[in-house]
C-alpha cells in the first residue's frame, strides 16, 4: 500500500515517462487524467503518495487537495508549470507536502518521492517485521505467521493489519482506518471495518472473544497492542 503512487495529470506522455521510471524503482503506479477520475480511484483504494498537477481539465489540483485533506493525510507532491510564489504558498497552505515546478528531471522527482516516503513511512532497505505475541507480520513480503504457521489473509485484512502495525501502541480512529485501507472517498460502511477486525481477531488472537492485541478503543477506533 505504501509503495503505491497515484499520478493525477492530464499530460499522458509525461505520465507514461514518470510511470516507467517509478516502476523501475519498485513503485506501483496508477494514473488519473481528471479530478473526477481521481475521486473515483480514491474511493476504491488507498495510496502511499499522490503526485498532483494543478491544472486539470475539470478542476484544479488545489481544490482536489482541499477535499482530500478533509479525509486523508496521504502525502501529496504538487508538480506544476505554475511556479509563482503565491501558487507555491497556496499548495503548502492547503496541505501539500512538497512542490516541484515543471519542467523537472526524473532524478529530482525520484529523489523527492523517496525523501517524502522515508519521512512519512521510514522506509529502509531491510525487511520490516512487526511482532506481537506469537504473531509475526512481514510488511515487506506481506506475509503473516502465528506460532510459526503461515496464515492466509485477504488483501483488505492484510492492509488493515498493516495500518494497525504502522501505529502499534496508538489508537487509530475508525475514519482513518477506512480512509487508508478502503480509500479516501470510499463509501464503505463502518460495519465493514468491524467485520474485518473480527476476522483478524479470529485468525490472530488466541481467544477472539477476549482479544489481548487488537483492541477496541471506545468511541475512537482500534489499537494494536504489542507485548508488555
Image (spheres, rainbow, N blue to C red):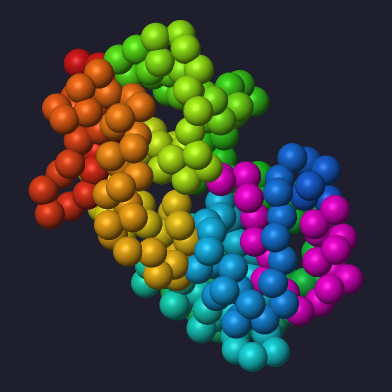
Residue 199, percent from left and from top: 34, 37
Left or right of residue 177, residue 24 in this image: right
Position of 87 relative to 157 (above/below): below
Horizontal side of 28 relative to 147 (left or right) equals right
**Seen from this angle, which residue lies furthest bottom?**
58
Between 188 and 100, the one nearer to me in the picture: 188
Task: State the residue lying farthest toward the left.
Answer: 218
Q: Residue at x 60, y 62 (%)?
A: 50
Q: Which of the two residues, 181 or 113, is positioned nearer the viewer here?
A: 181
Q: Quadrant of the C terminus?
A: top left
Question: Does residue 67 sit above or below 196 in this rendering?
Answer: below
Report the number of numbered marks: 0
Tell me where residue 173 appears, x and y as whole percent. 26, 53
Dividing the picture into quadrants, the one containing residue 141 is top right
- Specify whether 143 is left or right of 25: left
Q: Who is closer to the viewer here, 144 or 51?
A: 144
State which quadrant residue 205 falls in.
top left
Outermost residue toward the top? Answer: 148
Using the rendered image of the protein, determine whether residue 5 is visible from the camera's viewpoint. yes
Q: Is residue 174 above or below residue 85?
A: above
Residue 77 seen from this side: no
- Which residue is at a point 85% across and 68% down the rendered structure image? 14
What are the residue bounds of the magenta stretch?
A: 1-20
Q: Is residue 10 magenta?
A: yes
Near-viewer residue (145 or 13): 145
Measured as percent of width and height from the top left, residue 103 is found at 82, 70
Q: In the image, what residue occupies the spot 20% across and 22% down?
A: 207
Where is residue 121 shown, x and y percent of the image? 50, 41
Residue at point 50% right, 28% down? 152
Residue 159 on the magenta segment: no
Amino acid at each position: 500500500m505504501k509503495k503505491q503512487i497515484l499520478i493525477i495529470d492530464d499530460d499522458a506522455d509525461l505520465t507514461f515517462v514518470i510511470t516507467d521510471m517509478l516502476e523501475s524503482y519498485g513503485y506501483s503506479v496508477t494514473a488519473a487524467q481528471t479530478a473526477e477520475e481521481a475521486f473515483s480511484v480514491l474511493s476504491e483504494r488507498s495510496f502511499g503518495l499522490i503526485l498532483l498537477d494543478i491544472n486539470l481539465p475539470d478542476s484544479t489540483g488545489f481544490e482536489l487537495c482541499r477535499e482530500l485533506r478533509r479525509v486523508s493525510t496521504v502525502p501529496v507532491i504538487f508538480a506544476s508549470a505554475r511556479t509563482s510564489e503565491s501558487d507555491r504558498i497556496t499548495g503548502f497552505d492547503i496541505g501539500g507536502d512538497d512542490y516541484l515546478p515543471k519542467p523537472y528531471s526524473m532524478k529530482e522527482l525520484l529523489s523527492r518521492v523517496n525523501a517524502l516516503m522515508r519521512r512519512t513511512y521510514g522506509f529502509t532497505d531491510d525487511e520490516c517485521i512487526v511482532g506481537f505475541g506469537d504473531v509475526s507480520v512481514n510488511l515487506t513480503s506481506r506475509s503473516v505467521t502465528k506460532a510459526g504457521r503461515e496464515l492466509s489473509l485477504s488483501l483488505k485484512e492484510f492492509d488493515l493489519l498493516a495500518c494497525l502495525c504502522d501505529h502499534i501502541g496508538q489508537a487509530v480512529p475508525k475514519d482513518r482506518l477506512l480512509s487508508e485501507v478502503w480509500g479516501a472517498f470510499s463509501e464503505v460502511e463502518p460495519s465493514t471495518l468491524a467485520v474485518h477486525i473480527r476476522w483478524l481477531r479470529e485468525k490472530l488472537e488466541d481467544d477472539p472473544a477476549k482479544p489481548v492485541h487488537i483492541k477496541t478503543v471506545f468511541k475512537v477506533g482500534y489499537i494494536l497492542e504489542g507485548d508488555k
